[in-house]
Image: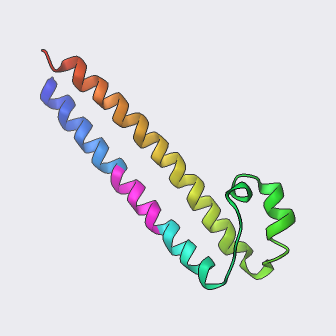
Amino acid sequence: MYLFLVSLIIGLFVAMLFVNVYFRVRVFKSYKILVQNDVEFDATHMFNKEKMAKEIFPKYPDQQENIEIFVNHIQYSIKMASVLAALITLFGGVLMWYRYE
């Protein structure tokens, strides 16, 4: 049972890590496009769609799609990082629980 749990935990951890890295690469590609086009906005704009629509989209109307892609990738990457941290904690707890058996 212990060997199965350890194998499962390692497999899930590696899978989540690769998914997280994949989305981070996509974030950097989107970021590169925005930097090349001199698009600037704050983190507050990323998490407030109304503020983004009022202040940033009128400034950069031709980059609206790229901005939305970047913001969506950032938000998804943050969610994946949170899930990864929760899984690491959960898996660590499982391993500690079964370490003496």
The residue lying furthest to the top in this view is 101
Q: Is residue 27 above or below residue 93?
A: below
The residue lying furthest to the bottom in this view is 36
Residue, x 69% and y 58% (percent of image)?
A: 46
Instruction: Give how far across and how far down residue 52 sits, in percent.
Output: 79, 62
Q: Quadrant of the C terminus?
A: top left
**Residue stretch in magenta:** 17-25
- Is residue 84 on the magenta stretch? no
Q: Quadrant of the N terminus?
A: top left
Residue, x 46% and y 40% (percent of image)?
A: 83
- Is residue 23 on the magenta stretch? yes
Q: Main secondary structure of the magenta part?
A: helix
Instruction: Give how far across and how far down residue 82 sits, in percent.
Output: 48, 42
Q: Is residue 33 above or below residue 81?
A: below
- 10 horizontally vs 71: left or right: left
- 98 horizontally vs 54: left or right: left
Residue, x 62% and y 77% (percent of image)?
A: 34
Q: Is residue 16 above or below residue 55?
A: above
Instruction: Give how far across and how far down residue 84 sits, in percent.
Output: 41, 42
Q: Is residue 83 above or below residue 69?
A: above
Residue, x 46% and y 47% (percent of image)?
A: 81
- Residue 63 quadrant: bottom right
